[in-house]
Amino acid sequence: MVETEHEALFAARACRYPPVGRRSLGQFAEPWARAEETPQAANERVVCAVMVETELGLANVDKIAATPGIDMILVGPFDLSLSLDQSLERTITAAGDGPLGAIIRACRAHDVIAGAFAGTVERAKALRSIGYQALALASDVKLLNVGAGMILHDFAPARASALSVGSNGI
């Protein structure tokens, strides 16, 4: 979570090796049977995404997007709505005229990817329609729960609807 351009710069530098960043080298590719990558190549490949989910972050979103090394601004409409003391529906439906539109405009102005957590396919479609490019459709917990439910259904269809992941030792 980033609220100022100073915090954004700190995040961007933490993602990259010197001279543009301050990440430590720590070469660990060999134990993972991967080829070593040069710091320069890693700096070119990394994507630094910061979350803007507060009223202060929203007020500074243009400066955050303009920060060297910031490649994506990711917004969680749920937390942003909470910070703004407004409903999720209002945040989503205000779209282009509201806080989500302000984030899109800042990202476009500075050639930064606009990302958002949607949580549902319907919300993802709404966010995509206003310009969000990178969308998280579900949380890892939801994906694991759905996948486990499918496996349980295949294994024991009659019992699957009565069970949920995390209960009854499953």
Image (spheres, helix red, strand yellow):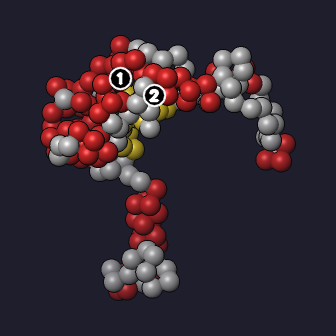
In depth, the one of 23 and 150 nearer the eye is: 23
Residue 47 showing in the rendered view: no
The numbered mark, 2 or 1, whose residue comes first in the sequence reads 1
Identify residue for label 2.
72
Q: Amino acid at mark 2?
A: Met
The quarter of the image holding the N terminus is top left
Left or right: residue 120 compared with residue 147: left
Residue at x-position 15% and y-position 33%:
94
The label on residue 157 is none
Q: Is residue 77 left or right of residue 136?
A: left
Residue furthest to the top in view is 109
Q: Quadrant of residue 13?
A: top right
Which secondary structure, mark 1?
loop
The residue mark sitting in front, 2 or 1, is 1
In which quarter of the view is residue 103 placed? top left
Q: Position of residue 40 (x, y in %)?
A: 72, 20
The local secondary structure at tag 2 comes to: strand
Q: Is residue 131 above or below residue 78?
A: above
> What residue is rendered at 81% in x and 33% in y?
36
Q: Residue at image x 43%, y 80%?
A: 167
* Residue occupied by mark 1: 60
